[in-house]
């Protein structure tokens, strides 16, 4: 392959990776899909490709759909048993992030909701909301009609919106104050204060450190508070499991504030928060090692600053 063809592909690699991550919810799988796209590009008769960007988008999208359908057919990922891979702020896979729709499409909350859509609905939603493709362009990418694209988009938006009825989102400074107070209550045992910091329709989802067969879900304020209190309560057994002194840092993960647990220099867990009208409306806890690899790698290349809890 000539250098011009390689350069043309590399110019669009980040965009393809961002698309694949939104479609698959996994950075590792997204990288594999992009590499497979490159192999297809390498083998293609490029002289006959009129619009390389459109061709690459079509190939990458359909490779991702093949992966989704294959995983569903093998029952490897089903809604209720799988959480997306969290990414630290600044990760290029989180782009583009110029509009509200683009930023919203990459939150853990929305990526989790997209698991409930069919692969075609998910693809149309991502292409339309995050990348602003027209229905004519989406129809060409997915080999469907424009009417079908519009129907998929309508169903996807309605299903996402039905689960995303929240109050006003907090500004970063307000969200930080709420999460800091929440963390203080969780680690001190003030369950009554924890309950007061939760919205009436709060949800908490955890992967159980990768040990549970299905996701752990809690929906009432009291149950969420009890779950959080147990999770953040320091015990000798938890400290032994961490293998090193544990510190809690605040960072932005997938566009929202998160508590990142670090043992020594290794990330061992992350809890992402959504804050609405001064209270916590949802939490997503991820501690499975295979879901933290990219976040951990990114953490090693940043100066995290002072932890909010230095010795847990």
Image (cartoon, grey):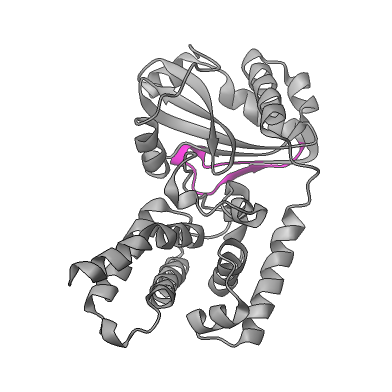
At 64% across and 30% down in the image, what residue appears? 227
- Quadrant position of residue 216: top right
Instruction: Classify 31 as above or below 107.
Output: below
**Picture residue at 40% right of the left edge, 15% below the top:** 245
In percent of width and height, residue 68 lies at: 46, 67
Quarter of the image holding residue 122?
A: bottom right
Q: In this view, does 299 lie above or below 167?
A: above
Q: Nearer the viewer, residue 102 or 69?
A: 102
The residue stretch that appears in magenta = 204-220
- Count the numbered circles shown: 0
Task: Work out which residue is located at the far left of the displayed protein and give it.
Answer: 1
Query: Is residue 63 depicted above or below 263 in this figure?
Result: below
Tell me residue 257's x, y (percent): 60, 34
Whether residue 230 sits left or right of residue 194 in the image: it is: left
Answer whether residue 207 is magenta in the image.
yes
- Looking at the picture, how far across and down is residue 115, in whole percent? 57, 60
Query: Where residue 265 appears, x then y in whole percent?
Result: 35, 23
> Is residue 42 visible to the viewer in this orientation of the structure?
yes
> Foreground residue, 99 or 245?
99
Residue at 41% in and 24% down = 303
Residue 261 drawn in magenta = no
In the rendered image, the quadrant that contains the N terminus is bottom left
Q: Residue at position x 64%, y 23% from top? A: 229
Asked if residue 289 shows in the view, the reply is no
User: Which is more toward the observer, 77 or 266?
Assistant: 266
């Amino acid at each position: 392959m000539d250098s011009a063809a390689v350069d043309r592909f590399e110019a669009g690699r980040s965009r393809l990776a961002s698309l694949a991550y939104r479609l698959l919810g996994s950075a590792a799988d997204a990288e594999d899909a992009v590499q497979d796209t490159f192999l297809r590009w390498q083998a293609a008769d490029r002289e006959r490709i009129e619009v390389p960007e459109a061709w690459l988008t079509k190939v990458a999208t359909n490779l991702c759909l093949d992966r989704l359908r294959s995983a569903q057919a093998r029952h490897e990922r089903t809604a209720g048993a799988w959480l997306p891979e969290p990414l630290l702020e600044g990760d290029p896979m989180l782009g583009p992030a110029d509009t509200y729709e683009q930023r919203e499409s990459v939150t853990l909350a929305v990526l989790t909701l997209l698991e409930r859509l069919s692969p075609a609905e998910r693809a149309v939603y991502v292409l339309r909301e995050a990348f602003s493709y027209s229905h004519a362009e989406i129809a060409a990418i997915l080999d469907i009609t424009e009417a079908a694209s519009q129907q998929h988009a309508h169903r996807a938006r309605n299903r996402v919106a039905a689960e995303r009825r929240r109050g006003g989102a907090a500004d970063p400074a307000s969200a930080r104050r709420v999460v800091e107070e929440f963390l203080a209550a969780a680690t001190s045992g003030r369950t009554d204060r924890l309950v007061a910091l939760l919205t009436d329709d709060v949800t908490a989802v955890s992967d159980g450190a990768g040990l549970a067969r299905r996701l752990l879900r809690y929906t009432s304020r009291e149950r969420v508070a009890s779950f959080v209190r147990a999770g953040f309560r320091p015990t000798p057994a938890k400290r032994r499991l961490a293998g090193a002194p544990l510190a809690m840092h605040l960072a932005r993960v997938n566009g929202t504030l998160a508590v990142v647990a670090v043992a020594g220099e290794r990330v061992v867990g992350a809890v992402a928060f959504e804050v609405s009208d001064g209270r916590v409306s949802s939490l997503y806890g991820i501690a499975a090692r295979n879901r933290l690899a990219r976040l951990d790698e990114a953490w090693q290349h940043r100066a995290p600053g002072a932890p909010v809890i230095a010795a847990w």
